[in-house]
Image: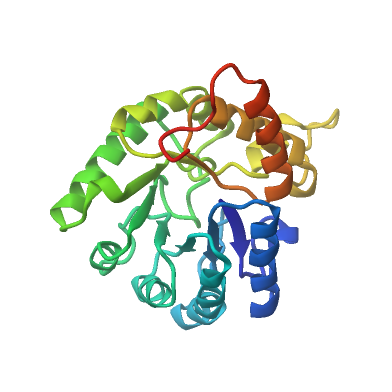
Amino acid sequence: MAIVNATPDSFYAASRTLEAESAFERCRQAVADGADILDIGGESTRPGSSGVPEREEFSRVVGVVGRAAGLGVPVSIDTAKASVASAALATGASILNDVTALRGDPAMPEVAKRFPTVILMHMQGTPRTMQQAPSYKDVTGEIIAFFRERLAAFERAGGDPARVWLDPGIGFGKELSHNLEILRRLPEFQALGRPVLVGASRKSFVGKLLAGATGEPLPPEERLEGSLAVACRAADAGVDVIRVHDVRETKRMLTVYAAVRPSPPFGRLG
């Protein structure tokens, strides 16, 4: 899954696209590089972000989604706003990626029912507050319980849980130790019987793990190798979807990894 940020403020500067034409070109290049899914978003959810007005998010993404839908791969709309999701669905999106797991906008569950695929992500708090001392007794167990509740809620709203993918939300209300535990225990999420997505590309925990002698985390621009290591771990754990900034590099790494691994990587989606 290729990340396409139609935003001016996403945490990784090289991923930002300030005009619709450049966002579409990013989509086209991602498909050429081997992306299986395009994930288009118009609102940064980096730690501390406060969101953008509905009209602005709408203008950033809906036209891009319509053009990207002609590129031959499924298009995902990364939004927590029901109106944006509905418009994106009408213009060609087939996947809804909601970081609030349908808890943010009261109208979203009704819109989500119309999507062929819905991604529910775990987040403790909101993007503005999520990194203010997140706390868990058992991070993996608590996320699994959260997913069970969200799947049941979606079903009560009339949705089909069989169309849901699950994202444990690396970096969303998690400290370094929480992220590492999730990655080590990834196979446990498969007990829920739903495809699992991991999005860890160039996130801050990678920079912390690669901190130099000064102890300063490496910036996003220097986190590629660490991100590839996480993608390798995700494949090894049977994860179904890996959400990345660097499609070509990740695709090449996974191609070689699949050739040398004793059994095929990835899970239900192939």
Residue 98 seen in render: yes
Decide if residue 185 is on the left or right side of residue 232: left
* Position of 101 relative to 144 (above/below): below
To which quarter of the image does residue 226 belong?
Answer: top right
> What x and y, as percent, mark residue 44?
57, 63
Q: In front here: 239 or 6?
A: 239
Question: Residue at horizontal 63%, vertical 30%?
Answer: 232
To which quarter of the image does residue 16 belong?
Answer: bottom right
Question: Residue at horizontal 70%, vertical 74%?
Answer: 22
> What x and y, as percent, mark residue 246?
70, 49
Question: Residue at horizontal 30%, vertical 57%?
Answer: 103
Decide if residue 234 is on the left or right side of residue 92: right
Q: How many marks?
A: 0
> What x and y, as percent, mark residue 28?
66, 66
* Position of 4 relative to 166 (above/below): below
> What x and y, as percent, mark residue 66?
51, 77
* Position of 43 relative to 58 (above/below): above
